[in-house]
Amino acid sequence: MAAPNGNGDRLVAEGIAKRFGAVVALRNVNLRLGRNEVLGLIGDNGAGKSTLIKILTGFQPPDTGRILIDGQEVQLKSVKHARSLGIDTVFQDLALINELSVYHNMFLNREVVKKPLPFLANRIMKRRAREYLDDIGVQIGDVNDEVARLSGGQRQAIAVARSVHSDASILLLDEPLAAMGAKEGAMILDLVRRLRDERDISIIMIAHNYVHVLEVCDRVNLLRGGEIIFDKPTAETSVEELTNVVVRDLRAARQGS
């Protein structure tokens, strides 16, 4: 697997904390993402993964802590601001519209228009959509097809391609393999590998399946109770170790409650 290239971390989060009333979602999260690295983020439901991703993508601010991109501290003011800094997220719902074509979804909220009249430049968007998909090796028959006709893997790939070609350098993938079969899951894992190996992109991938994490990620973090309690290169761990860490920590939590 590719390792960080030594030019410093692409993204660093230090001392991130977030609470909602009496509920503590994140306590003291310290996370780093290397250049051209795929980081697997695992943890049970309620561990704080979604809150962390929302903070890193500019959807909500942390209560305390700081975020650095390429060594520079930033205050993420909104999702749009985060995108302008190269951070984009592909959530489970994908933000695709079933009734629209592949190419219209590729340019959703980023439409190319003719000037001076505000008409959609459909021919240009079709051509670019085809180029974008071919560029990262995504097999889609016809960009005129409605998204509703595509498989789950193809839909996921469209959402990823849209982010990549919006100049994202940090890509957050929220459960990209959820509810997919083996063939479609393999397609998305191959896409993640190509993005890491062939483009200047760093990826955080949230996943529940430890096998998938070990197969495609360079490093794995385990988030439990609002803190990262495990950080290790995937080449130095195993499904058995990850499972044992989760079980041991869960037992300790139960005994302490």
Image (cartoon, rainbow, N blue to C red):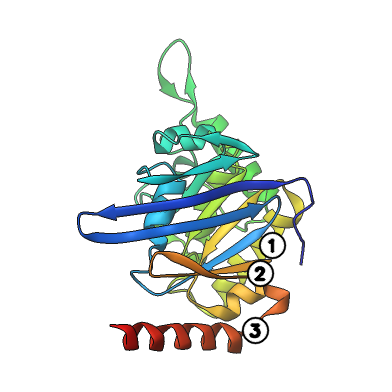
- Mark 2 or mark 3: name the one nearer the start of the chain: 2
Residue 104 image position (x, y, % from top left):
45, 40
Q: Is residue 105 above or below residue 91?
A: above
The residue located at (50%, 78%) in the rendering is 181
**Quadrant containing the C terminus in the rendered view:** bottom left
Between marks 2 and 3 in the image, the one whose residue lies nearer the viewer: 3
Instruction: Characterize the local packing of mark 2: few (<14), some (14-19) or many (20 or more) Cα atoms within 10 angstroms.
Output: many
Helix, strand or loop for disc 1: helix
Residue of label 2: 216
Residue of label 3: 238
Mark 1: amino acid: Arg
How far is mark 2 from mark 1, CA to CA? 7 Å
Asked whether the residues under the numbered discs 2 and 1 touch, taking CB atoms below 8 Å apart as contact, a structural biologist would say yes
Occupied quadrant, residue 73? top right
How far is mark 3 from mark 1, CA to CA? 19 Å
Q: Is residue 57 above or below residue 213?
A: above
Helix, strand or loop for disc 2: helix
Helix, strand or loop for disc 3: loop
Left or right: residue 235 compared with residue 51: right
Q: Is residue 2 above or below residue 246?
A: above
Q: Is residue 162 above or below residue 251?
A: above
The residue located at (40%, 75%) in the rendering is 44
Residue of label 1: 193
Between marks 3 and 1 in the image, the one whose residue lies nearer the viewer: 3
How far is mark 2 from mark 3, CA to CA? 13 Å
Work out whether residue 49 can be spotted. Answer: yes
Left or right: residue 182 compared with residue 254: right
Work out whether residue 144 can be spotted. Answer: no
Nearer to me, 232 or 123: 232
Residue 77 image position (x, y, % from top left):
40, 33
Residue 233 image position (x, y, % from top left):
69, 70
